[in-house]
Amino acid sequence: MALPNIFNKDISENVIQRINNLKPETQPNWGKMNVSEMLAHCNVTYEMVYENKHPKPNLFMKVIMKSFIKKIVTSETPYKQNGQTAPAFKIKDSRNFEIEKNRLIAYINKTQQLGASSFDNKDSLSFGKLNTVEWNNMFYKHLDHHLNQFSV
């Protein structure tokens, strides 16, 4: 079963509506992150696409990522609760809820406006070239996982 298409305006607006239902005091159903940290954590995926602030993995790590992690991240299989988080995705400082929320909404809108064709065969920082289905699964599945974590 295919995941909802985050490049579709209705789907991206639904995800944004779910984000807008979050409040600074929203509590998680599982995990250690608070809601502001979760939003910052979700922003990392988009920072790796649009910003030049995360280092590229070395050749050894890229082979490991492509061989063992890529399928987990880009498949339709949902993430498990309390799964391992890559070091770049660990938020180690406090974050401002409104800033992180607005950043995430802006990234989702930008991605939707660029459209699926902009991502076809586009290089990802960690996994090399991905097709549009893999990009969609990576974007949507991660967001959905964490929005479910916070009951929205």
Image (spheres, grey):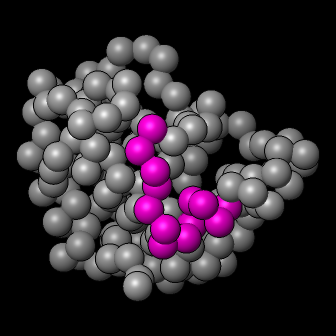
Of the pair 119 and 58, the residue shown nearer to us: 58
- The image quarter containing residue 98 is top left
Q: Position of residue 10 (x, y in %)?
A: 18, 76
Q: Is residue 78 magenta?
A: yes
**Residue 5 vs residue 120: left or right?**
left
- Measuring from the top left, give residue 48's x and y in whole percent: 57, 47
Q: At x 38% / y 64%, what residue is drawn?
A: 140
The residue at 33%/21% (across/down) is: 95
Question: From where the camera sits, is residue 116 visible?
Answer: yes
Q: Which residues are magenta?
A: 70-82
Q: How many marks?
A: 0
Q: Image quarter for residue 96?
A: top left
Left or right position of 43 against 39: right
Question: Residue drawn at (46%, 51%), measured in percent from left and top?
Answer: 80
Relative to residue 75, is residue 67 depicted above or below? above
Q: Is residue 71 depicted above or below 94 in this figure? A: below
Q: Is residue 138 left or right of residue 30?
A: right
Taking the view exactly as shown, the residue that stands out farthest to the top is: 93
Magenta span main SS: loop
Is 140 above or below relative to 92?
below
Quarter of the image with the N terminus is bottom left
User: What is the quadrant of residue 97 in the picture?
Assistant: top left
Please give the name of the residue rendered at 71% of the width and 37% of the height, measured from the top-left corner. Answer: 55
Residue 64, position as x, y percentages in the image? 82, 51
For residue 99, say whether it is visible. no
Q: Position of residue 113 (x, y in %)?
A: 34, 71
Q: Is residue 4 magenta?
A: no
Considering depth in this image, is 100 or 86 the residue closer to the camera? Answer: 86
